[in-house]
Amino acid sequence: ATDEGAGGQKPTIAEKLVRLGTAAELFHTPDENAYATVRIGGDDGHPETWPLNATGFRRWLQREYWRSYGRVSNTQALQDALGVLGAMAIHDGLERTVHTRVAGTDSAVYIDLGGSDWTAVEITAEGWRIVTEPPVRFRRARGMKPLPNPERGGSIDELREFVNIRDEAAFILYVGWLVGALNPKGPYPVLVLNGEQDSAKSTAERVGRRLIDPYCPEFRSPPRSEHDLVIGAKNNWVLAFDNLSHIKPWLSDAICRLATGSGYATRTLYENDEETTFEETRPQVLNGIGDIATRGDLLSRALILVLPPISAGDRKRESDFYDAFEKARPRILGALCNAVSAALRNLPTIEPESLPRLADFGAWVTAAEPAFGWAKNTFLDAYQHNREQANELALEASPLTPFIRELAVDGWQGAPSELLIALNDLAPDPLKRLKAWPKSTKGLTNELDRLAPDLRAAGINAERGRDANGRFWAVAKV
């Protein structure tokens, strides 16, 4: 309390707060957000990382002021001090990446367990252990819930009791998605759970989420804008959407970008010409009745599982079900940690020639197969079959498909406007009045560009080009 302030004067409250704040490690992220890592509980305590403008850091700073001076800081002084500390973090602090739930280094994967002691699971090619001070920095969103400490000796087969997935290939895909969601680098296929009422789609979604990234609320409704989707991705590792009946085209495109990684920029609040940027890649899971994913680009990034209905005799009391799951959850999480360790160990030996789209995901899960006792390429075989079914769904969802097939029988080539006329001549009037039917050559080109990979997989080549007469489309059987 006897420190001198500026010009030899008695230090202000803000100056005292700044000096207390410099006891924390101040740093900034690549997008220039200011952060601080503080040690809670003295020298024997644990580190916590908070944005400087978050409640957690404010409370820590106010507590330090009370402990040092026995007084309460006023709001304006606290705000002034945070401004100075933020400037120090940006201009004097190191640049570090801050992660949500899952992070990676060159040789390890870290999972934030989300508990009050801020411990994490460290997974390497040699195995896994719980560490008190991981070398990566995690941030905590307000809704994040803790994971249990994983336990050794568990088996992924214990998971079968808690998901209504009876088909063996579908169970392999579900487990593969869980293992893929623990890869810090992505990309991540979108897990789509279909089925009629009483097929426990939401339960399978909830169980998967509680094994990887428990959060409150567990499910979210469809976002109203891409900005809302990206904000959700900043605060969640897994995005879970429940009971969807339809996915709008803009949302389908945004989900695709988030699955494989892309940036998003928006105007910074209260600024005229400054942008705030986000660049995230996230695992996502959707569920709904019927075929909620219909656009080809989303289907090409999706794992689609159809869950069977549960008979009345097979239903369980919810309280009994989740009590049993909570007892098994540490062992199942331990089995997933074993799989991640196997993936790190075996990944360098995976041959890239046989990998599908989302090749990094396919390689990661293939490398993890030995941890489950699966034969070589068990996952890729199931994945390839699922991709073929997704191709069929994409073709069935487009009103153009039967008429493109018809033109392909003898082969067809002509200008885009001529192709639109040819398709209009083949299609009945009620079909042409549908919103999904292209009304212009631009709309036709956009639809065929999306459909072309699925048509090719079905033995039809639809490609566009340019010759001396201008642009053209060519349709033929492969």
Image: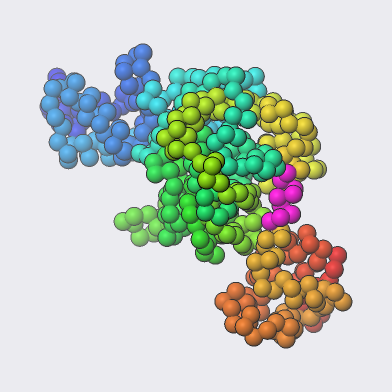
Where are the magenta residues, as a range?
382-390
Q: Is residue 45 visible?
A: yes
Quadrant into which the N terminus falls:
top left
Question: x%, y% of residue 133?
Answer: 45, 21
382 or 114: nearer the viewer? 382
Residue extending furthest toward the top: 44
Question: x%, y% of residue 316?
Answer: 49, 38
Question: x%, y% of residue 185?
Answer: 59, 39
Q: Is residue 220 above or below residue 72?
A: below
Q: Is residue 195 above or below residue 88?
A: below
Question: x%, y% of residue 470?
Answer: 76, 80
| Residue 384 falls inside the magenta stretch | yes
* Residue name at image x 45 percent, y 56 percent: 222
186 or 68: nearer the viewer? 186
**Within the image, what quadrant is residue 157 found in?**
top right
Q: Is residue 214 visible?
A: no
* Residue name at image x 77 percent, y 32 percent: 375
Question: In this image, 366 relative to 205: left or right?
Answer: right
| Residue 16 falls inside the magenta stretch | no
Quadrant into which the C terminus falls:
bottom right
Residue extending furthest toward the front: 313
**Within the image, what quadrant is residue 228 found in?**
bottom left
* Residue name at image x 66 percent, y 69 percent: 398
Q: Is residue 328 above or below residue 448?
A: above
* Residue name at image x 60 percent, y 19 percent: 153
Question: In this image, 438 relative to 347: left or right?
Answer: left
What is the basis of the colouring in this image?
Answer: rainbow
Question: In this image, 289 relative to 341: left or right?
Answer: left
Total residue callouts: 0
Q: Main secondary structure of the magenta part?
A: helix
